C-alpha cells in the first residue's frame, strides 16, 4: 500500500509571529466581550464604577491593548532585529500580565477569564520562544 504524505511548507517566522499576535488579540476581545455577561458588570459600566472609570484609565487600557493588535502588522513589517526585540519584550510583558490576571481572577463567574488568560499566556510565551530562536541566515560568502 502506498503511503500518502501530505505536503507541508516552511512558514516564515514573521508570519508565525503575526498569526500568534492575531490569536492573542482575538482572545483579548472575546474575554472582554464575555465579561459583559458577568452579573453586575454592565451596571458598573453604566454607573461609572467599573475598573475603567475615568478618561485616563480608559486611555491607558486603550494604549495597552493597541500593542498586540499593532504587533500583528509590525511582526510582518519590521526588520528582523527590531522585530525580534519587540516580540520578546512585549511577549514577556503580556505573558506576565495575563498570568497575574489568571491568578487573581479565580471565581465561578470568571472561570472563562482564567481560561482565556492561561491561553493568552501560553501563546505569548510561544511568541517569546519563537522570537528568541529567530532563524539565522547562513552567509553564502563563508561557504565559498
Image (cartoon, rainbow, N blue to C red):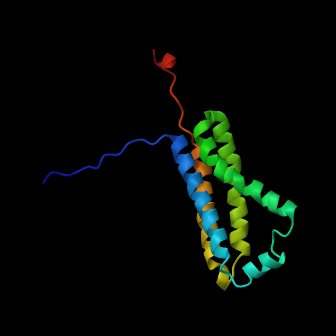
Measured along the vertical axis of the image, is residue 130 above or below residue 43? above
**Residue 114 seen by the camera:** no
Measured along the vertical axis of the image, is residue 131 above or below residue 111? above
**Residue under the image location 76 percent in, 57 percent down:** 62
Farthest-out residue, top: 144
Q: Is residue 114 left or right of residue 141?
A: right
Picture quadrant of residue 114: bottom right
**Residue 96 seen by the camera:** yes
* Residue 10: image location, x then y, percent: 42, 41
**Residue under the image location 71 percent in, 72 percent down:** 103
Q: Is residue 37 left or right of residue 44?
A: left
* Residue 143: image location, x then y, percent: 46, 19
In the image, 126 versus 25, the foreground residue is 25
Farthest-out residue, front: 46
**Residue under the image location 76 percent in, 81 percent down:** 43
Picture quadrant of residue 109: bottom right
* Residue 36: image location, x then y, percent: 68, 76
In what quadrant of the picture does the N terminus appear?
bottom left
Measured along the vertical axis of the image, is residue 52 above or below residue 72? below
Measured along the vertical axis of the image, is residue 87 above or below residue 54? above
In what quadrant of the picture does the C terminus appear?
top left
* Residue 137: image location, x then y, percent: 52, 29
Picture quadrant of residue 14: top right
Amino acid at each position: 500500500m502506498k503511503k500518502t504524505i501530505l505536503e507541508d511548507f516552511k512558514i516564515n517566522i514573521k508570519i508565525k509571529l503575526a498569526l500568534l499576535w492575531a490569536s492573542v488579540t482575538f482572545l483579548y476581545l472575546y474575554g472582554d466581550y464575555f465579561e459583559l455577561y458577568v452579573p453586575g458588570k454592565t451596571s458598573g459600566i453604566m454607573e461609572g464604577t467599573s475598573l475603567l472609570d475615568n478618561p485616563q484609565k480608559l486611555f491607558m487600557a486603550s494604549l495597552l491593548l493597541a500593542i498586540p493588535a499593532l504587533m500583528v502588522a509590525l511582526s510582518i513589517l519590521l526588520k528582523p532585529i527590531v522585530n525580534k526585540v519587540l516580540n520578546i519584550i512585549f511577549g514577556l510583558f503580556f505573558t506576565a500580565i495575563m498570568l497575574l490576571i489568571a491568578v487573581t481572577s479565580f471565581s465561578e463567574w470568571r472561570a472563562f477569564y482564567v481560561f482565556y488568560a492561561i491561553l493568552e499566556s501560553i501563546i505569548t510565551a510561544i511568541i517569546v520562544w519563537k522570537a528568541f530562536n529567530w532563524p539565522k541566515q547562513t552567509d553564502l560568502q563563508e561557504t565559498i
